[in-house]
Amino acid sequence: MELSTKYHGVRKYEESDVIIFKKGIPGFEHLKKFILFKLEENEEFNILHSIDDESIGIIVVSPFNYIKDYQFNLDDKKIKELNIEKEEDVMVLNTVTLSTNITDITVNLKAPILINVKNKIGEQIILDNPDYAIKHLLFEK
């Protein structure tokens, strides 16, 4: 299959690549199906792109590459909702806000996106942790 994106050209994908967000993503609750691919200009970043709306792509990054002590626990209800059997089945991503100045790029640590890579189910959750900001500088100044 092909997705003709607004900003990232044509992307080929298989049905097995589609990640289902049953609740959508906050701000995009009506969008349920996404694919994930590397940003060509910088492979540290990924694009979580809607296949329901070809103009919607969210820049995301693995927090563990930048924030050494980032961690949180999931309650049993969330583990069941996402059909998580093992910790290795979960991919954690955080949304990124880009800037022309690299030192001003921020990452949202407050609301990680969880993806069960085995079952292709995703959800963005809100953490109740005052130490995690919505706009955390990605790179130390």
Image (cartoon, helix red, strand yellow):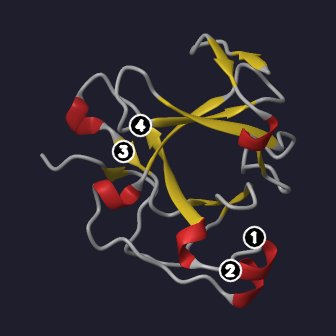
Identity, as a three-letter code, of the amino acid under mark 3? Thr
Q: Is residue 59 left or right of residue 106?
A: right
Question: Mark 3 vs mark 2: which is more N-terminal?
Answer: 2
Q: Nearer the viewer, mark 4 or mark 2?
A: 2
Residue at image coords 77%, 85%: 77
Q: Is residue 22 left or right of residue 127?
A: right
Q: Where does residue 5 sit, x and y in percent of width and height?
A: 68, 15
What amino acid is at disc 1? Answer: Leu
Q: CA gap, disc 1 to disc 2?
A: 9 Å
Question: Compared with residue 110, is residue 32 higher up or lower down, i.e. above or below?
Answer: above
Residue contact at pointers 4 and 1, CB within 8 angstroms: no
Q: Which residue is mark 1?
A: 82
- Quarter where residue 63 is shown: bottom left
Q: Residue furthest left?
A: 141
Callout 1: few (<14), some (14-19), or many (20+) C-alpha neighbours within 10 Å?
Answer: some
Q: Which mark is residue 45?
A: 4
Q: Earlier in the sequence, mark 3 or mark 1?
A: 1
Disc 3 vs disc 4: Cβ atoms closer than 8 Å? no
Mark closest to the chain's N terminus, 4 or 1 = 4
The residue at which mark 2 appears reads as: 85
- Spatial CA distance of label 4 from label 1 is 24 Å
How far apart, in angstroms, are the residues tagged by discs 3 and 2? 31 Å
Mark pair 4, 2: CA separation? 27 Å
User: Can you tell which mark lies on residue 59?
Assistant: none
- Residue under the point 29% across and 48% down: 138
Q: Nearer the viewer, mark 3 or mark 4?
A: 4
Q: Amino acid at mark 4?
A: Phe
